[in-house]
Structures are given as C-alpha cells and as structure tokens.
C-alpha cells in the first residue's frame, strides 16, 4: 500500500513538475515576494534582495554569452563543445613546453579562470540567468525576463551559438587529458541554477512553446550523456564530493524532465555515498585530506543536502538520517555547525574558510525536518563581509531563496 501511495504521489508530482522547482521552495519564494512588496522583509532578506537586483541590473548590460566565445578550440574542432581546464594543475617548469601539467592541490592556476576556456563563462552565465529570472519573479519587471530568455536561447537553442549537450572536454589537463570525469562537476550549475530558473521562467510573457520543446530536448540529450558516457560513469563511481554532485546534478535534471526512475536511482546511489563518505562522528575523511578541507567538507554536504531536500519533496524517503553503517548527513552537519562561528578554530589543514557557507545547509535541514535543530547557529550568523561573493551567496540562499525555519 505504501509503495502504491508513493507511486501515486510521484505521478501527481510528475504531472505538476512544470510548476515545482527541484531545489527552490515555491512557498518560500512566495513569502519573500510578499514580504518585499509590503516592506516587511527582515534586514538579511532585504540586503540579499538588493544584492540580487544589482546583479540582475548588471546582467542586463552583458552580451548574451555562448561557448563559442572562447579562444581555445576543443579537440572536436567545434567551439560549440564546452571546454574547461582543471584549476589545480600547472605547467611543469622543468620541461621546455611545460608539459605535462602537474597538480598542486588547492592552488588555482589563473589560466583555468579566463575567457580562453568556458569554466568561468558557464558559472557567470548560469548565475546571471538565475538572478535575472528571480528579479523578474520578485518584481514582475518584464525586462529581466526578456534578457533571461535571450540568454537562454543564445546558450542552448540558437543553431550557431548553442552548447552541444556534453562535457567531453571539461577540466582537461594539457599534456595529460583533453577531458576528465572530474569535469562533470562543472555541469552542476545546470541543475542547481538553470532548471529551477526555467521552471519559474515558463510563466513569463515571451516564453514560447518552441522554448519548452528545445529546452526539454537539450536536457534530455544532456541527461543521456550523464547516464551513459564513460567519463560521466566514472564520476558516478567517485567516493568523494564528485560522486555526490553527480547524484545531485542528475537528480535535479531528471526531476525537471519528470523522470522518476532516475531521481529514485540517484537518491539510492547517494545513500551508498553517505555510507562510504561519512564516519559515525560526522567527519568526511576524503574531504578532510584536502588542502582546502573546510571548503570541500562543506561542498560535499551542499550536494547531499540539496538531494536530501529533493528526496523529501519526491516522497523518496529520509536521506538526512540515512546511516548504513557509517555516519549520517545530519551527523556531518552536526560536526560542522559549530564551525559556522569563525572564532572557533578549524583543526585540519586548510587554505581558506568562509564559515557562513555552512549556514544555508543548516537552514535547509531545519526546514526539511521541521525542527529548530540548528537555530542557534543560523540566528547568530553575521553577514557583514559583503565583499565576499561566498558570503553574499550564503546570505541569499538562507534569507532570500528560502527562509529559516520558524516554530509554529
């Protein structure tokens, strides 16, 4: 009987998926919209809204981006194929041509972060696309929707500028590999930013049936690549944050496409990832071994928390408490929550730390479980470092794109 109920619930969800984002909460977005309209928003919400609106206003002035804008040519001979360089690899000073590049964990090579490749371009495009869509949602100002639609069509649809739906040449390493399974991580923004924005944007004037057909087709082809390409399958097997993000990316896109079987498969795969990655004390050995141990511990939990929230929405069980036999996602959040206080020493090796980044995950857990488990950490957080993009994003995720849990 329970399986029948879940199947009926999923059928209803699939039929209404066009109006229900994977990772955003329509209920929270509607509350925030009303608060902004009636000048009742809390100061952190208002600050986050001003930041998002500024980003959207700036994006109105940007040319529509495309993967064809890059300087480098992919091995395929088509600039419509996405290409990025792995961030932690550098030319070998001992060889005349610098090849093959050598790894320096945590040290970002500036050559991976310029317009010659697509990594920064994809991140900037998806962030602007999301900001424009949200600015339209909160204000109803059509110019934001028009710009978002123009960017969408240029990146995904127009024959001469569209990105081919693959990541064959993502996070390549000169002298070693044209593309690696690690590069599948680049595509996480398609799930966490683009498909939810599409779900909102469908209600905007200017959205055409042809847009719907083209975007469904693009993401269907990309999902097929994610589920069958050898590079993607290697990423699916990863036992660190890469494997977690694979599950979350695939599940988010499958949700957008109404593919219940794939969402279910990703939730079950994530249960196995949690068992392998998290110890009983909540530590994550694979991430703590990195030179940026705080960042990667948070980053892995970001993927798993998003998927746990989606699993609950889809009626696929409780991923927060899943424990077989190691630690649980909640144990990992419990372990990291005190370090949201920047004055508490992080005892592992580390290059950087933005303590506030864990706060949206704590808030997400409270909202999903309907309990104030992490209330003390959320409410004591300071959002003063507005020069930090990571802090601004954490504030936005906590106070604008969702709202902290409040007891009835």
Image: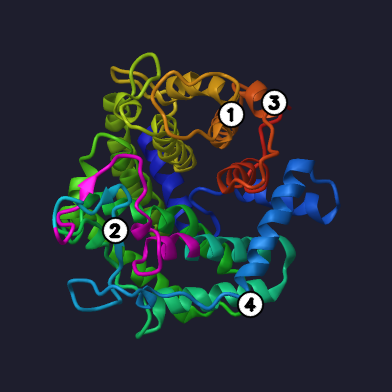
Query: Looking at the image, which residue is at 41% across and 31% down?
Result: 297
**CA neighbours of label 3 inside 10 A, class few (<14), some (14 to 19), many (20+):** few
Nearest to N terminus: mark 1 or mark 2: 2
Rounded to the nearest whole Å, what is the CA distance between mark 2 and mark 4?
38 Å
Residue that numbered label 1 is attached to: 366
Q: Position of residue 340 (x, y in %)?
A: 57, 26
Between circles 3 and 1, the one closer to the viewer is 3
Residue that numbered label 4 is attached to: 205
Label 3 element class? loop
Instruction: Please identify the dominant SS of the magenta region.
Output: loop
Q: Are marks 1 and 4 in contact (CB under 8 Å)?
A: no
Nearest to N terminus: mark 3 or mark 2: 2
Q: Are marks 1 and 2 in contact (CB under 8 Å)?
A: no
Query: Looking at the image, which residue is at 56% across and 20% down?
Result: 338
Q: Read off the magenta span.
A: 96-124
Can the viewer see residue 260 in this picture? no
Nearest to N terminus: mark 2 or mark 4: 2
Label 4 element class? loop
Which mark identifies residue 85?
2
Can the viewer see residue 67 in this picture? yes
């Amino acid at each position: 009987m329970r399986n029948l109920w879940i199947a009926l619930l999923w059928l209803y969800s699939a039929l209404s998926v066009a109006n229900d984002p994977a990772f955003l909460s329509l209920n929270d977005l509607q509350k925030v919209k009303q608060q902004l309209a009636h000048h009742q928003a809390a100061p952190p919400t208002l600050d986050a809204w001003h930041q998002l609106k500024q980003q959207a206003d700036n994006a109105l002035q940007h040319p529509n981006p495309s993967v064809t804008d890059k300087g480098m040519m992919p091995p395929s001979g088509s600039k419509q194929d996405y290409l990025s360089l792995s961030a932690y690899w550098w030319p070998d000073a001992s060889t005349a041509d610098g090849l093959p590049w050598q790894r320096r964990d945590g040290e970002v090579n500036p050559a991976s972060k310029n317009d010659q490749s697509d990594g920064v371009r994809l991140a900037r495009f998806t962030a602007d696309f999301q900001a424009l869509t949200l600015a339209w949602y909160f204000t109803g100002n059509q110019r934001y929707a028009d710009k978002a639609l123009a960017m969408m069509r240029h990146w995904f649809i127009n024959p001469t500028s569209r990105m081919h739906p693959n990541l064959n040449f993502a996070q390549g390493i000169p002298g070693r590999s044209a593309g690696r399974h690690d590069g599948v991580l680049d595509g996480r923004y398609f799930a966490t930013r683009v498909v939810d924005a599409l779900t909102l944007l469908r209600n905007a004037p200017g959205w055409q049936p042809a847009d719907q057909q083209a975007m469904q087709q693009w993401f269907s082809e990309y999902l097929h690549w994610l589920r069958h390409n050898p590079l993607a399958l290697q990423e699916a097997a990863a036992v660190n944050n890469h494997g977690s993000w694979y599950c979350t990316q695939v599940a988010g896109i499958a949700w957008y496409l109404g593919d219940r079987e794939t969402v279910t498969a990703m939730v079950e795969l994530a249960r196995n990832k949690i068992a392998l990655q998290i110890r009983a004390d909540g530590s994550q050995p694979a991430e703590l071994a990195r030179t940026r141990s705080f960042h990667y511990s948070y980053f892995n939990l970001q993927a798993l928390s998003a998927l746990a929230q989606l699993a609950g929405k889809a009626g696929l069980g409780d991923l927060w408490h899943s424990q077989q036999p190691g630690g649980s996602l909640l144990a990992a959040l419990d372990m990291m929550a005190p370090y949201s206080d920047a004055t508490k020493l992080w005892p592992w090796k580390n290059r950087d730390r933005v303590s506030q980044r864990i706060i949206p995950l704590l808030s997400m857990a409270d909202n999903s479980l309907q309990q104030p488990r992490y209330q003390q950490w959320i409410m004591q957080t300071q959002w003063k470092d507005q020069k930090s993009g990571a802090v601004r994003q954490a504030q936005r995720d906590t106070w604008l794109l969702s709202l902290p849990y409040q007891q009835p």
